[in-house]
Amino acid sequence: MPFENSRLRSTTRATTRTTALALALTAVLATGPAAAATAPDHRSDGHRANGLRSDGHRATQDALRAVVEKGGLPGVAAEAWDGRGRWFGAAGHADTGTHRERTRAEHFRAASITKTFIATVLLQLEEEGALSLDDTVEKWLPGVVRGNGNDGRAITLRRLLNHTSGLFNYTSDPEFADRTSGPGFPAHRYTTYRPAELVALAMKRPPRDTSGTASYSNTNYVLAGMVIEKVTGHAYAHEVRRRILTPLKLRETSFPGTRPRMPLPHPTAYSRLHQRQPDAPVVDATEQNMSWLGAAGEIISTTGDLNTFFRALTGGRLLGPEATRKMFTTVPADAAGWRYGLGIESVTLSCGVTVVGKTGRANGSVSGAVGTADGRHQLTFNINGDWLGDASSYVGVVEAEFCGARNGQGAP
């Protein structure tokens, strides 16, 4: 299970599966045609919505309300595209002190959705003949993956991208986790980490056997970012901007590097720092140096930009047919119901619809970009709080949007 979600597991098996599915569902998006023009915001039943859908996505709006009222989260914003137009809905607040509402213009930390951008660049580099996914990590980063049974000579770039490398997830190191996303976060929120430091932390632990299933590890994508820099001679953020953000005009998407502040407008990011007590204090985690995730999760974006990115990805604007096939070829994961591709995740919903895309979690922010593989229907959402509350509320948002009445949630 991805780090963003793994520390939120319930103590019971049933709840664990619900939680895994919940954030897997909030996790996967593919896209197609360009977004339709947006109508002015209007209010319905106390919540904001805009777009061209006359039905108002009632089931999805109800599910968003449940995230706040049943799930106990501060606020949630979502944008959907189904071929008939674009719809935006929200519930709760961007700031609980001022009761400022969530809006479509808000930027948020999309965290591990960064991985899809990184995988896309590596696949483009393979198309250009600059590398092969069958290259070993050792070829590009000699001596970096060594020690305690780790061997870069036995790990290909493909295995980094689909999480079958077996490399220890450095963000699961207890001391590191305490400093970056636990009680030690307030004292370390501005600390800068170098990619080599993060990989070295992972090398202190032996690899795990992944012969049966993929095992999520942020270490894989820190290494993938290092490979991009070695192959191109440029920072991975530069390559993503040049190859993806600029051509697609994703003007609201950025790589902050070590800069801790968010572009305006943005919601307040509320975090309980993985403390499970019902009365655990809530911390404002909006400002943070994301170098602790780097190529594994530093990106900032908006619901509209992420929808545009995934539409372009599935629509063949970023990759050719063979590279697209590789990206969406999945392997079983170690989390129930999940499958991993190259920078993407996949899960089948209760109504039989399979959605693909990516989830992400940073302190105070949980995001998902999910959609059908043909790009005809998609959803991106962000919650500006990072504790689970009632996990069924997360499931409800995606189930309502993609299953609607078939899931007993009423007509969409």
Image: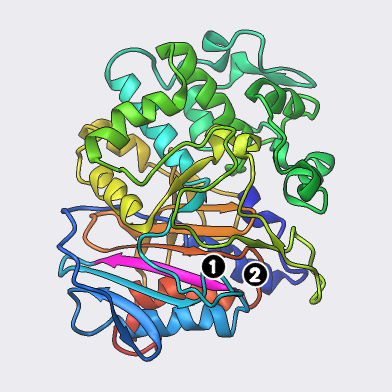
Relative image position of residue 215 (x, y in whole percent): 62, 43
User: Element type at marker 1?
Assistant: helix
Relative image position of residue 386 (x, y in whole percent): 63, 63
Read off the magenta span: 74-81
**Is residue 75 a member of the stretch shown in magenta?**
yes
- Label 2 crowding class (10 Å Cα cut-off): few <14, some 14-19, many 20+? many
User: Element type at marker 2?
Assistant: loop
Q: CA distance from mark 1 to mark 2?
A: 10 Å
Lower position in the chain sequence, tag 1 or tag 2: 1
- Considering every residue shown, the one lying at the far front of the view is 98
Residue in front for this viewpoint, 337 or 102: 102
Q: Residue at position x 82%, y 72% from top?
A: 277
Q: Which residue is mark 1?
A: 22
Q: Are marks 1 and 2 in contact (CB under 8 Å)?
A: yes
**Is residue 100 a member of the stretch shown in magenta?**
no
Relative image position of residue 54 (x, y in whole percent): 18, 83
Q: Residue at position x 52%, y 83% from top?
A: 66
Q: Residue at position x 43%, y 42% from top?
A: 341
Q: Which amino acid type is shown beneath numbered disc 1?
A: Ala
Name above or below for residue 361 compared with residue 87: above
Left or right position of 321 against 282? left
Name above or below for residue 288 compared with residue 276: above
Q: Which residue is mark 2?
A: 388
